[in-house]
């Protein structure tokens, strides 16, 4: 299923955070370095459960521990993915509803909201309790970097956009838009090519 976001109809867009709006792996790699003395490469994070080489620490457990123990340092220190702010502003200006749908623990949502504000990323709602199956959420389109989430959205009849990361497997959601950056993602969803500093074809700044 596909969706076009440049038409008259307002859509509800479910937006993931980690790996979609923000670059989560650099901070995680730094945390692993501090905790385990191991230098992980981004390309080594090909799934969210594996033992850090030479240790008995699991990458997924470390991720949760970083959010639990040092949430401000960990979450506020992440940089936006290139084009994420502009993409959210475009969605907002097109009249779509943006619902933030992250599997971060609910108690960290105020920090995520602060991060979104600091990076001028507009949104309409932060969903407080996101089920494991994001396909259960109300919305027309899910943009996410985890193939399981996108596959669940597709199975529920929604459109999907998958950000390619080392840990994502596009083969399980081939009917989604598959993109490595926001520019490609939005072009596939209907945004006209942008000219820097000018209004776009729909007349929005
Ligand atoms: Mg994610």
Image (spheres, rainbow, N blue to C red):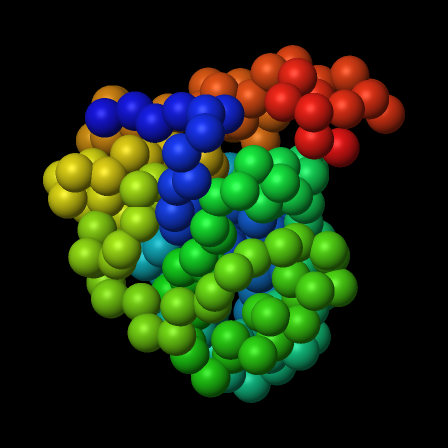
Please provide percent x and percent y for residue 142. 35, 43
Q: Can you tell which quarter of the image residue 114 is in?
A: bottom right
Where is the N terminus found, in terms of image quarters?
A: top left
| Residue at (73, 57) in percent of width and height | 119
50 over 46 or under it: above or below: below
Q: Where is residue 107 in the image (x, y as percent from the top left)?
A: 47, 84
194, 97: nearer the viewer: 97
Residue shown at the point (47%, 67%) measured from the top left: 126
From this viewpoint, which residue is outermost toward the right? 197
Residue drawn at x 31%, y 49% is 139
* Vertical comparison of 66 with 167: above or below: below
Given residues 5 and 85, the one toward you in this image is 5
Q: Where is residue 182 in the image (x, y as percent from the top left)?
A: 58, 31
Q: Number of callouts in the render?
A: 0
On screen, residue 96 versus residue 4, left or right, reads right
> Does residue 74 appear in the picture of this structure?
no
| Residue 37 position by quadrant | bottom right
Q: Which of 21 and 99 is in front in this view?
A: 99
Decide if residue 160 is on the left or right side of residue 95: left
Q: Is residue 200 left or right of residue 62?
A: right
Q: Residue at x 24, y 66 (%)?
A: 131
Between 15 and 200, the residue placed more toward the observer is 200
Q: Can residue 66 be seen in this view?
A: yes
- Whole-percent x, y for residue 205 in the image: 75, 32
């Amino acid at each position: 299923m596909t969706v076009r976001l440049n038409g008259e109809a307002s859509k509800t867009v479910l937006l993931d955070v980690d790996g979609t709006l923000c670059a989560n792996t650099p901070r995680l790699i730094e945390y692993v370095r501090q905790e385990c003395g191991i230098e992980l490469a981004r390309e080594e994070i090909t799934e969210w459960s594996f033992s850090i080489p030479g240790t008995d620490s699991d990458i997924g457990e470390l991720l949760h521990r970083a959010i639990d123990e040092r949430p401000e340092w960990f979450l506020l220190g992440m940089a936006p993915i290139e084009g994420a702010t502009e993409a959210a502003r475009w969605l907002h200006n097109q009249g779509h509803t943006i619902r933030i749908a992250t599997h971060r623990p609910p108690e960290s949502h105020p920090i995520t909201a602060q991060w979104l504000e600091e990076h001028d990323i507009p949104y309409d709602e932060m969903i407080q309790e996101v089920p494991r199956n994001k396909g259960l959420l109300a919305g027309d389109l899910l943009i996410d970097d985890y193939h399981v989430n996108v596959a669940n959205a597709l199975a529920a009849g929604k459109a999907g956009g998958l950000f390619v990361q080392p840990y994502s497997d596009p083969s399980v959601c081939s009917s989604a838009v598959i993109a490595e950056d926001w520019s490609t993602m939005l072009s596939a969803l209907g945004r006209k090519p942008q000219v820097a500093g000018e209004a776009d074809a729909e007349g929005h700044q």
